[in-house]
Image (cartoon, rainbow, N blue to C red):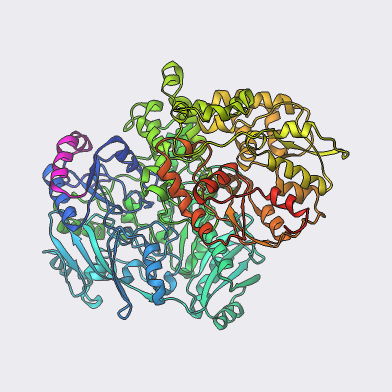
Amino acid sequence: MRRGTRHPCVVGTDERVAGKGGALAAELRSALAGDVDFGASARALATMDASNYRRVPAGTVAPRDADDVAAALEVCRRHGVPVVARGAGTSIGGQATGTGVVLDLTRHMNGLLSVDPEARTAVVAPGLVLGRLREAVRPYGLTFGPDPSTHSRCTLGGMIGNNACGAHSVAWGTTADNIRSLDVVTHRGDRLTLGTGGQGAPPGLLDLVDRHLALLRTGYPAGLPRRISGYALDALLPERGTDVVRSFVGSEGTLGVVTGATVSLVPLPAEPVLVVLGYADETAAADAAAGLLPYGPLTVEGMAADLVRGATGLPRGGAWLFCEVDGEGAARALVRAADAVDAAVVRDPAGQRALWRIREDAAGTATRLPGGGDAWPGWEDCAVPPARLGAYLREFRALLAEFGLRGIPYGHFGDGCVHVRVDFDLWTGKGVRDFRRFSEAVADLVVAHGGSLSGEHGDGQARAELLPRMYGDELVALFGAVKDVWDPDGGMNPGMLVRPRPLDEGLRFEGLPLVGVGREAARCVGVAKCRVAGPSTGDAVMCPSFRATGEEKHSTRGRARLLHEMALGEVITDGWRSEEVREALDLCLSCKGCRSDCPVGVDMAAYKAEFLDRHYAGVSGWWRRPRSHWTMGGLPHWLDLFGRAVNVATRLPFAARLAGVTPTRPLPRVAARTLTAWFADRASSRPPALTLWPDTFTDHLAPEVGTAAVRVLEEAGLGVTLPPGRVCCGLTYVSTGRLGAARRVMRRTLDVMERETRPVVVLEPSCAATLRTDLPELLPDDPRAARLAASVLTFAQALETLAPHWTPPRIDRPVAGQTHCHQHAVLGDAPDRRLREKAGLTGALAGGCCGLAGNFGFEPGHEAVSLACAEDQLLPALRTTPDTAEILADGFSCRTQVAHLARRRARHLAEVLAEGLDGPR
């Protein structure tokens, strides 16, 4: 059958499916207990996974249990509508997208049903996130062996669909090696429990195998631990136990829907030690990897300097192997055996986590090439025999050069599996043709080395068309026959793996404008690091609204997908007026966490500002804007204009309603005297070494922070001056999407600061971040903007760089509190941590977002999310903090949130140090 030809049983065309929406949705709602959503937002959120492909579904269904799955399949079969099961949507081959009904198995079918520590098994639902399983069985000293880098959000059902592997596969194998049994519902509603010895095989499957024993015994490459491509039909051979489970794992949702699984668990290493081996270059590391396997490493992961990009803690070299072993003795033996340039043995768990984070972020990091440019999946995860890896990589690099392409290989070198993202031009016809030519050439190269087109993520649409090059036409035809036994109607995920769509069809970039927010949103590759439920860990911020709601549309990825669809105009048809996009962005706190925590640097705060600006453009938009955009958004103007009179206004009846803010929060009080007034009345004998920025919050609402900062800076020998006129960074105008006003405010500020050559110290982290990033991005053609941005220092940065020999007063108290999310995302807090350490302020500050986030927490309808964000890290940390501890929060919003919700006083670091100058309190 020629490339891309539909199976004769596949029901309906995409157009027919789209036309069935109303009747299909109504019948599904009557048949299911779960959720049915055929709205534009739900459809837009499911058009893409983490691949290059896009398919528009008719609607989504979130079944509650196996009965719901069976009912949904029955309704869809009667209507002639295909079905695709979806977990976290992180598939890279396109197999988690579909034109019919998408089953979201993460919303309800996500439980850990039981654990048997003695038998080392667990029973799981398909939507259970791997990280939750691992956390639950850790107290028993157990784990689930396969551990993809997306373990914090990928689901067991998705891992079963793709036969996922992860870093520890050299020790614990693939998902197929760790599944005892599967509960499956077929497209025709048969409920099967799959096992070994032929258990659960649909009628006709074993007879088909018996007729092709010779082909199954000779048609698969040998010596290949990461053979993920195609169906694993050789598992059905009698000498391999007629293992129906293993043959089903990796079928990418094309045979049936998994509704439950019994999985095997493995013991955790008693003394995990990370050995990092440095080599001259990538191919030297690849050549060495196979030789390390006899020493029993748990991981042999490879990456080169172009991926790690300045990471600390690595030994000398241009490429590295990350080898985890169990025990100090094993670590020493491995180091002795390795012919490495240098080696580091990392025993500290925190140090190990920091280094592993480099690897876990690689799927996103590799999409941003050194020196600029985007790279995409497409030849993402091939595998060759480990002993052939070095030779393969040399030829692969040569092939990249031949096509004028760039990519950063990395991956599971011990298993011969290489991940790489390549800077394909997927926006133009020529670029897409080159993408096809390159894919065909690499497929031939992999096969020449005895490899598999996929070594981890499955074939999907990206590689399935090329399977005949690996397996030959006869075995690929057998794949089709097996598909027909399981799914005679062809309704399960058609176009994937068997009878595939062409690899260059349906690319998600087709029709997307080359510039603008749609192009920016397309940078989101879907690895879904933003889609992590539960409390954030460490200093991570992204994505507070998803953790608060658990809804995809309130994740960074979900919002990016909606903006992508808005730019295309097919599913979301009303462009910048879209209420679906506005609703999704409404709960974005503009925390900027995604700017740093997202591996590809998606900046949803900037996209939100542009959307709001355009959404409310024009006369009609002016009237539709929330009142808070004019009141809270124009706060600098109102405070400059009315000063303390604002206090009187806020005490008036219905003041909150008139201002468009929630009455459940007390509004901040305006200070009796501004910082600028205080500074004008004092004399300083020191020549100014820096300019202190009188931001609106410090000047009008918390001048005590500014006076404390002046005192500390002068004590450190630094003369201080203020700008010669009124300045404002424009933050409140940006966050409410009034970009025209923001640019006007910024230009007036640049006029004031035009001749300023001194460093500019900004006490409020959100204002410092705005000056560093938003200012030059909104005024890219004004060289003054870049100069001012480059001059900005935080309070701690100023003391460290301008007064490096100054010793702060010893405070010697424990601390708790909040690192401002903008500081984390844009400015960094390493100087702050060093300054606190010098002052004897011990302990760490909470990460995450406080939840107030400027105007966000004051706006009606945001109260629950604001509280949930505070409960993520901040409030739990404060509850366990003794009354004697110092509560630190440099951000005005953070201090306000602490006062409102914890009834405790938080202070800026400058205030604490200024008090310390007077001696112990």
Measured from the top left, where is residue 911 in percent x and y? Answer: 70, 48
Whether residue 904 is situated above or below residue 700 in the rendered picture: below
Whether residue 26 is situated above or below residue 312 in the rendered picture: above
Q: Indicate the quadrant where residue 524 lies.
A: top left
The question of residue 875 being in magenta is answered with no
Measured from the top left, where is residue 313 in percent x and y? Answer: 64, 64
Residue 405 appears anywhere in the view: no
Q: Residue furthest right?
A: 685
Q: What's the magenta bit mostly, secondary-structure-wise?
A: helix
Is 74 displayed left or right of 507 in the figure?
left
Residue 592 appears anywhere in the view: yes
Q: Which residues are magenta?
A: 13-34
Q: Residue furthest top?
A: 619
Pick the front one: 284 or 178: 178
Measured from the top left, where is residue 519 in percent x and y? Answer: 47, 35
The question of residue 17 being in magenta is answered with yes
Q: Residue furthest bottom?
A: 329
Pick the front one: 562 or 431: 562
Pick the front one: 235 or 831: 831
Q: Indicate the quadrant where residue 705 lies.
A: top right
Pick the front one: 856 or 756: 856
Is 824 displayed left or right of 46 in the figure?
right
Is 683 displayed left or right of 792 in the figure?
right
How many numbered marks are there?
0
Image quadrant occupied by the C terminus: bottom right
Measured from the top left, where is residue 292 in percent x and y? Answer: 52, 75
Residue drawn at x 27%, y 36% as measured from the top left: 39
Q: Indicate the quadrant where residue 545 lies.
A: top left
